Image (cartoon, rainbow, N blue to C red):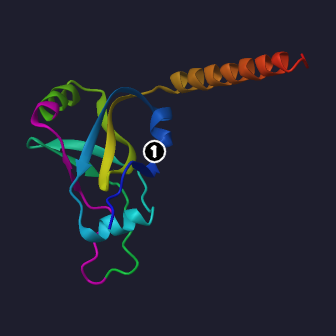
């Protein structure tokens, strides 16, 4: 059987980019059970309430919902259990310092298969205020309107 190649997206946390200012991103591995991987292969996961914490020098992903595998038996997993994150020691040490300084959190942005292994993108993020969110929405709308006007100009419709 040929090995899987490339990147296949499983789940994405679009709200995280709206609610947080992303300062840095990390590609990390996850310690999962067999039924979790089978459930992810079916494309079922939710990152909406997820976050990561650093406890005793280890990073843990919490409140990420991976539903039970439908054909699973008594060996099925708990849907919202804590999952260990695999990172290099130097990266974990940097994260410990940055998250302790206050105002910063670790948020999962997406979950995907990379060459057959489950990976996640964790972001070191700072929460946005409501006026920052409004400013970003207004900026996005103005960029979209400029693109539309330019398209009309190019097509000669003015």
Residue 95 in the image, given as x and y percentages of width and height: 19, 31
**Quadrant for the C terminus in the image:** top right
The residue singled out by tag 1 in the image is 13
Residue located at (24% from left, 48% from top): 29
Residue located at (49% from left, 40% from top): 15
Residue 84 lies left or right of residue 4; in this view the side is left
Looking at the image, residue 9 lies above or below residue 17: below
Magenta segment boundaries in residue numbering = 73-91
Dividing the picture into quadrants, the one containing residue 46 is bottom left
Q: Nearer the viewer, residue 24 or 2?
A: 2
Residue 76 in the image, given as x and y percentages of width and height: 28, 76
User: Tag 1: Cα neighbours inside 10 Å, few (<14), some, or many (≥20)?
Assistant: some
Q: Nearer the viewer, residue 124 or 49?
A: 124
Q: Secondary structure at mark 1?
A: loop
Dividing the picture into quadrants, the one containing residue 34 is bottom left
Residue located at (38% from left, 81% from top): 71
**Quadrant for the N terminus in the image:** bottom left
How would you classify the magenta stretch by its main secondary structure? loop
Residue 132 lies left or right of residue 38; in this view the side is right
Residue 27 lies left or right of residue 45; in this view the side is left
Observer able to see residue 39 = yes
Residue 17 in the image, given as x and y percentages of width and height: 47, 34
Looking at the image, residue 5 lies above or below residue 80: above
Q: Nearer the viewer, residue 132 or 87?
A: 87
Observer able to see residue 48 = no
Q: Nearer the viewer, residue 120 or 135?
A: 120
Label tally = 1
Q: Residue furthest front?
A: 2
């Amino acid at each position: 059987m040929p090995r899987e190649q490339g990147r296949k997206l499983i789940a994405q946390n679009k709200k995280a980019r709206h609610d947080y200012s992303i300062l840095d991103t990390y590609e990390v591995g996850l310690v999962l059970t067999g039924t979790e991987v089978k459930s992810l292969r079916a494309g079922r996961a939710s990152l909406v309430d997820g976050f990561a914490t650093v406890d005793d020098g280890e990073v843990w992903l919490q409140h990420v919902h991976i539903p039970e595998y439908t054909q699973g038996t008594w060996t099925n997993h708990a849907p919202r259990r804590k999952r260990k994150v695999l990172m290099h020691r130097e990266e974990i040490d940097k994260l410990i310092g940055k998250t302790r300084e206050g105002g910063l959190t670790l948020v999962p942005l997406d979950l995907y298969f990379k060459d057959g292994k489950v990976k996640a993108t964790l972001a070191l993020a700072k929460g946005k205020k409501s006026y920052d969110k409004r400013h970003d929405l207004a900026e996005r709308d103005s960029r979209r309107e400029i693109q539309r006007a330019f398209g009309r100009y190019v097509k000669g419709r003015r």
